[in-house]
Amino acid sequence: MSLKKCVIAALCIGAMNINLVNNADAVELKEQPKLQAIADELIAENRYTQKELEAVFSKATVQQVVLDAMTSPAEYKFTWGKYRKLFLKEDRIQQGVEFWNEYQQDIERAEKEYGVPASVIVAIVGVESKYGRFKGKHKVLDSLVTLTVGFPRRSKFFASELKQFLILTKENDLAFDEVLGSYAGAVGYPQFISSSYRSYAVDFSGDGKMDLINQPVDAIGSIANYFIKNGWKPGEPVTSQAYETVDANIAKLANRKRKTQFTAASLRDKGAPLPESISGDERLNVLMLDASEIVTEPKNSDIYIVRAGDTACQIAETLGVSCKALSSLNSLNQQGDIFRGQRLKLPARSKKLPAKAKQQITSNDRAQTTSIEGSKWEVAKNSAKQADPEPASTVQERFFFTHGNFYAITQYNHSVLYAMAVHDLSKAINLAKSNADQALNRDSAE
Ligand SMILES: [Ca+2]
């Protein structure tokens, strides 16, 4: 099938779900007005000649698999529970610590120079490419050409990215027909799209190249640079603690917006239990995630999910296991620091499980918190109210006070669920890293 026919077919895919192409077809630039328009701009800007561009596009092929990925309904059904299951896995946390250890000097240099926490930089690399393990296997040239000519709904966006990609590859001496990325054209460790690459990539390794595909150090500096250029405020938090219930006046303000909406002072006036460290003029949002997005885990009595107010030894006692064994199995530090939402592996029970504990494990399976929060957070007064019997409908949601830095993360990906996943992963990695460092210090002291 020629591409011309494909494009006409593409206009119908929503209604008819027909195959756009059976086989990858080479592109004839002159037959594609959208591509020729990009070419004309590049020629007018003296970046390419018509002949060069004809050669470029002759290497491009339309990929049905890219269109399938874009139109997959799964794309629009991501819930918080799915995000968490995908990103807050033990291996992603552990590999985050390994990545951090491997590039510690550069990650800490980025934190110092840009003011973006090391753990957030690591979490982004973890969420985006699993620390470089999955940088994408689609030819970016093919993906962007396919989406420009075959995906009308966002054709303008992808045409612009295609133009940026062609400039980028020339500027950075990259082989335009060899660069691989996601089906939407995002590349490298941080999965930058071409326009972000050109705007925010830095040569953090100092070798004269900005290479986000092969140089993790460049990715580290570029992610920090991206955040600082997109409103990251050094030293400020991302979210305050998750609340299961909040004052009715605050609940009325709850929304799903990315941006901050209210001053801390106005929220305090309405009864928000914000930490004193937050100044009155700081702006926040009241974000609500509903029950359909709250994670549900398979029943597994070998795992305990930490709730607000738990301590390691109290959990051990309730569940009839040894506190020492629990701490050792989960590599807890000497203070036994745990965090809300943490999944603790349970050691073999030293005595019969008390009925109360069985009940607790079951309720743990049913009702999960939506956020991992550091143990440093004081337990909210509001959470304590949970003991009161409440109608089911009032415990179907969680509230978060989000800060400007939460918005900065959503600049990377516009989903509030994405930002929450990055935030939670960063906290989990931070804790695992600090535990690993402490264990290392203990070993070397002995
Ligand atoms: Ca470099």
Image (tube, rainbow, N blue to C red):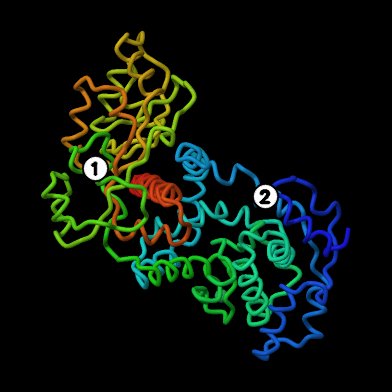
| Placement of the C terminus among the 4 image quadrants | top left
N-terminal of the two: label 2 or label 1? 2
Q: Could you tell me residue 132's position as x and y percent?
A: 59, 57
- Residue 385 position by quadrant: top left
Q: Which mark is residue 252?
A: 1
Please give the name of the residue rendered at 49% of the width and 42% of the height, measured from the top-left corner. Answer: 83
Give residue 264's quadrant in the image: bottom left
Residue type of the residue flagged with mark 2: Ala
Residue in view at x 24 percent, y 34 percent: 245
Kind of residue at disc 1: Lys
Indicate which quadrant contains ligand 1.
bottom right
Relative image position of residue 13 (x, y in whole percent): 73, 50
Q: 96 or 283, which is in the foreground?
A: 283
Q: Is mark 2 within 8 Å of ligand 1?
A: no
Q: Is residue 354 left or right of residue 74?
A: left
Q: How many marks?
A: 2
What's the CA distance linking mark 2 and mark 1?
38 Å
Report the quarter where the N terminus lies: bottom right
Query: Which secondary structure, mark 1?
Result: loop
Tell me if residue 162 comes above or below residue 410 in the rendering: below
Tell whether 11 sits left or right of 221.
Answer: right
Is residue 6 found left or right of 261 in the rendered image?
Answer: right
Identify the residue at horizontal 66%, vertical 84% (top origin): 41
Q: Which residue bears the numbered disc 2?
A: 69
Secondary structure at badge 2 equals helix
- Label pair 2/1, CB-CB below 8 angstroms: no
